Image (tube, rainbow, N blue to C red):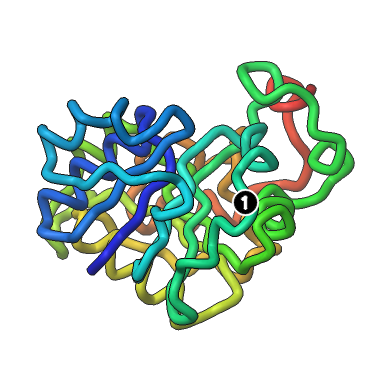
Amino acid sequence: MKIGIIGGGRMGGTLTRRLAALGHDVSIANSRGPETLAELAAETGAVPVSITDAGRDADVMIIAIPEGNIPDLPEGLLESLPESGLVIDIGNYAPQQRDGRIDALENGVIESRWVEAQLGHPVIKAFNNVRPPSLLNLGKPAGTRGRVALPVAGDDPRAKAVVIGLIDQLGFDGIDAGGLDESWRQQPGTPVYCTDLDLEGAEQALAAATPGRPAEWRA
C-alpha cells in the first residue's frame, strides 16, 4: 500500500517506522522540507517529499501534525490524492500544551469534523488515542490474549475497513467506533485515551465516555 504521512514528529515518525517495516511504500513530509527528514528516511527507507506531494498516488494519507497547524497546510494539499485515497486524522486538540485556543473546538465542534472542514475532504479518526511507545512496542499477533485495541471512527465503511486492516497489520485490534460524530469518545480526557486497553476494555471505555472536555483539555 502507498502511504503518505504529513508530520515527522513522534507519532508521524513512529508510524513511518512501523508501516515501512511492514513493507508499505511510505512517503514522509513536514513543514521544514524534505531535507530535514533525511535521517528518518535513511533509517526506514521512507521517501522524503514536499507536503503537497505527500498524497501523490497514495492509498492513504495520514495527517500527523498538531491541531493548531491544520489551517496552515497549503492549498491544494489533496489535489494529488487519488479519488479512492483516504485521509486519516490522528491529531488531538491540546490548547494548553501546544495549540492555543481554537474557538470552534471550545464551542463544541468535534475535532475531526473541524479537521474535515479545514481540509475539504472526509477523514477517518484513528491512532489518536495511542502513545508512540505503545504503537512502537505493543503490537501482537491476531488472537493474542490482551491485544491492545484502537478505535476507528468515520462515515465511510470502506475507508474504516482499510484502516482497521492497517491496525491489524500493526498488531492491534481495530474497533469500528461509529461515525465521525462519535469520534469525541476517543479524544483526550476520555476513558479510552492512552490506556492501552484490550478489545473488551476499549469497547467498555468508549461506551462509558461522556461529552465535554476536562479542564486540562480546554483553553
Using the image as rendered, state which of residue 110 and residue 66 is in the foreground. 66
Name the residue beneath numbered marker 1: 185
Residue displayed at 21% across by 54% down: 170
Camera-side residue: 152 or 113?
113
Which residue occupies 62% across, 20% down? Answer: 98
- Seen at 64% across and 27% down, the residue is 94
Q: Quarter of the image containing the N terminus?
A: bottom left
Name the spot of residue 70 as percent of width and height, x first: 63, 41
Q: Is residue 167 above or below residue 90?
A: below
> Which quadrant would the C terminus be assigned to in this image?
top right
Q: Position of residue 19 (x, y in %)?
A: 21, 52
Count of numbered marks: 1
What residue lies at 42% left-to-right and 48% top-to-bottom?
127
In-image side of 40 versus 149 (left or right): left
- Residue 150, given in percent of the width and then of the height, sits at 39, 53
- Side (left or right) of 160 relative to 219: left
- Location of residue 121 with respect to 9 vertically, above or below: below
Instruction: Please identify the residue farthest to the top as the structure is shown.
Output: 97
**Which of the 4 image quarters holds residue 105?**
top right
Percent coordinates x, y for residue 99 in the rendering: 67, 25
Vertical relation: 181 (above or below) 41: below
Q: Residues within 10 Å of mark 1 (few under 14, many from 20)?
A: many
Label 1 sits on what residue type? Arg
Identify which residue, 173 or 8, lies in the foreground.
8
| Residue 98 horizontal side relative to residue 128, left or right | right
Figure quadrant of residue 187 = top right
